[in-house]
Image (tube, helix red, strand yellow):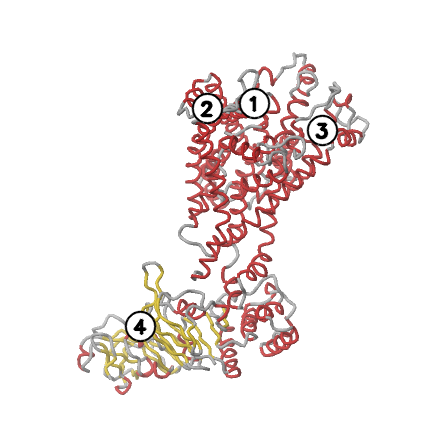
Amino acid sequence: MGAITLEQVTKSFGDVDVIHPLDLTVEDGEFVVFVGPSGCGKSTLLRLIAGLEDTSSGRIVIDGEDATAVPPAKRRLAMVFQSYALYPHMSVRKNIAFPMKMAGIDKAEQTRRIEQAAEVLNLTDYLDRRPGQLSGGQRQRVAIGRAIVREPAAFLFDEPLSNLDAALRVGMRMEISELHNRLKTTMIYVTHDQVEAMTMADKIVVLSAGRIEQVGSPLDLYHAPRNLFVAGFIGSPKMNLMTGPEAERRDAQTIGIRPEHLAASPDSGAWRGTVGVSEHLGSDTFFHVKIEGRDDPVTVRAGGEVSLHHGDPIFLTPDESRMHRFDAQGLRIA
Amino acid sequence: MATKASRAAARAMISPSVILLLGWMLIPLIMTIYFSLLRYNLLMPGANPFVGLENYEYFFTDPAFVAAVTNTLMLVVGVLVVTVGGGIALALLIDQPMWGQGIVRILVIAPFFVMPTVSALVWKNMFMNPVNGLFAHGAQFLGMQPFDFLAHAPLASIIGIVSWQWLPFATLILLTALQSLDSEQLEAAEMDGAGPFARFRHMVLPHLARAITVVILIETIFLLSIFAEILVTTGGGPGNASTNLTYLVYVQSLLQFDVGLGSAGGVFAIILANIVAIFLMRMIGKNLDA
Amino acid sequence: MARAITTNRKIINTAIAWFIALLIFFPILWTVLTSFKTEAQAIADPPLFLGFDWTLENYTTVQERSNYARHFWNSVVISVGSTILGLIIAVPAAWSMAFVPSKHTRNILMWMLSTKMLPPVGVLVPIYLIFRDWGLLDTQFGLVIVLTLINLPIIVWMLYTYFREIPGEILEAARMDGATLKSEVLYVLLPMAVPGIASTMLLNIILAWNEAFWTLNLTAAKAAPLTAFIASYSSPEGLFYAKLSAASTMAIAPILIMGWFSQKQLVRGLTFGAVK
């Protein structure tokens, strides 16, 4: 129903290669997240799948059929844009009805689907308002509603939560996940926020500079990042990466240990340092520790009750079973 | 968004305009150049032999030519001086705090929307006419002889009429530019001790410089082609006193039916306009990039 | 400005501004007033400002003597006609330049604007001859063609600037929603662009109504619009100021009203955006 495959897909704008030859499989019903820093090509990739841009080479296969030359209107995909892209001169009802109108669906069926979508998305009271009269979250829902009624093979989300404030974002995240559980339709979701990726995805595709760095489930990426980039990208706060004698001692060019896998103690431990900036979140505390002999601070997570202050001595002990090792090319050593 | 499909569609959608305008430009242009190389008079049917640059010779040595070029220049410069100078002054005035600014704007803008033949005739008859015009009445009231404007100062009179028509344009443009000047900048300058004249010289004028340039260039393009006002008031006279380049070509082509000669004049007018246009296009180009 | 403007200064500004504004507006005012006078009163010395017997005789005479209505109608037909024709040609072009720009877009736009700078006198001869040979002289149709062509660059330019203000994503959403190009333009673009299109139409009608080169040279009695008709205005009996005023008032009134509503569009359209 919603299986999408990319075969050796590339995209160049003039002389600039934005996407390097790339293979990817999205299974029917999966929630796949494209994540990566700004400019990594994730939005471009989404637009290639949508058909809003032509590939420079390679094939895009949707449900077994080559869709590379098929125009966006005919790919049976629905897209939710970052800016929602609602039709300002139409009411919510007409906005949601538009794709069905384009498909020639009869009026009775249109009304049925609109009412169903409105119920799911809590829009029933707003059907006759214009987008200009709605809040950001409501507009977001209208955009999703417009996508739902198409009954597409897959949903494409282009950073849909970026324009919402933080509290709203958390709520909408859950709503979208809930939607996925209900509809069981394939969803491809683009974001730069790795928290969204980790919480929502069945499968994460980490992209950097037009290349796929790693594909895997959230926990795969957390426990076994394939290279330095993924190791530093997934997880918040970032994994501590170190070169030098500590790495050499463990037969690696670079070692990595997550802040939550370091034990902190005021009196004894493997590495000695001084407390720098500390961030007290109530539930956790993050200390940025200046270790002797290193320039970059090491971040360690401690419980909320630990009270150490700027300048205090501190000792850190890594959990060796959670230590990551990387070779000179930045690739993971098993 | 750019897919092969949308790009193909875009090319198709833009072609009618491009083709039509290309045709509009090239076909008559080529014909004009062609005619300018023939001896072609509509009153004398028969062969129209190719005579090379003979028409150009006649055109440039025609005594009317020098007069036409001079008059064209004076018209353009005259109107520019009045409209730009007056426009700056008016824009500054209207920008001041006052009551009824909206109405003042409307009153000042109005002349631009009056069709040229109406304004020319109104000025010619009801104001400048030495017997029945208001100026004549005013002169007599002051005990002076009425002055026959169009007979004795034809070019100046036409400059006056055209200036009246274009002053609103300059004012509107300059007022728009003036109102885009950041008032906070002016206040900062005032805090720094700059008086009103200093502020005008060092902040307002430079900011307006670009708008002034645009006004000058656009007006020049249109002023080179002043036609209706001359046709309706003085018919180019007395003699050639108020004939500009456009009117001269008109006379040669449609009144004297010397199509060959008129075409040579037309080519000259095009070259002249192109020079101004090059400067204007640069300014527009700069802004398109912005 | 967060400073007290002295009321005195405001009074002075207002007085000076109103004085100058009324001075500039005076010829128009005078024309309108004179249109309601008798011919004798029109040339009276000292001039009668308000103290005359208002009459409508000039308005009726103008129509009776010279079929004013026909020329008025000619103006309407060529202004509205060239505007509509221009829009039909320009909307696709502006869509293409605003939403699918290529590296040539800027140059094409500038070239289009440059065609407006062609002095009409430079092509007077060929156009006149072509019109003569093709029976287009003194026809509404011929004038509509010419006016469309000379104003097309401005229509394209203005629509382009208005279209650029529409977020391209909304059109992409329409495409994703299954809209064909025609549907996209009809159901999404045009409704959103209505204010811009209306402004462009307003400006173009004004420019076409007042055009006074081609309308004077390519028409005679039949298709002459008001510009040409007024140009020939005189009267067999000699005195004609009042009738001229009536004819003029009727000719300029519609445009004055339209013009007062279109000041912003004027700046945008005629400076080709070089001034913001």
Q: Chain of mark 4?
A: A
Residue at image coords 17%, 79%: A248
- Tag 3, which secondary structure? helix
Label 3: few (<14), some or many (≥20) within 10 Å? Answer: many
Residue at image coords 63%, 40%: C78
Q: Nearer the viewer, mark 4 or mark 3?
A: 3
Check chain identity for marks 2 and 3: say if they share one.
no
User: Percent x, y for residue B280?
Assistant: 44, 38
Which comes before the other along the chain, label 1 or label 2?
2
Seen in the picture, residue A66 relative to C211 is either above or below; the reply is below
Q: Which residue position holds label 3? A: C245
Q: CA distance from mark 1 to mark 4?
A: 93 Å
Q: CA distance from mark 4 to mark 3?
A: 88 Å
- Tag 4, which secondary structure? strand
Q: Are marks 2 and 3 in contact (CB under 8 Å)?
A: no
Classify residue C165 as left or right of residue A105.
Answer: left
B29 and A182: which one is in front? B29
What residue type is disc 1 on?
Answer: Leu
Check chain identity for marks 1 and 4: say if they share one.
no
Q: Nearer the viewer, mark 1 or mark 2?
A: 2
The tally of labels here is 4
Q: Which residue position holds label 4? A: A276
What residue type is disc 3 on?
Answer: Ser
Q: CA distance from mark 4 to mark 2?
A: 94 Å
User: Percent x, y for residue A117?
Assistant: 59, 77
Q: Which residue position holds label 1? A: B255
What residue type is disc 2 on?
Answer: Arg
- Residue lying farthest to the front in this orientation: B46
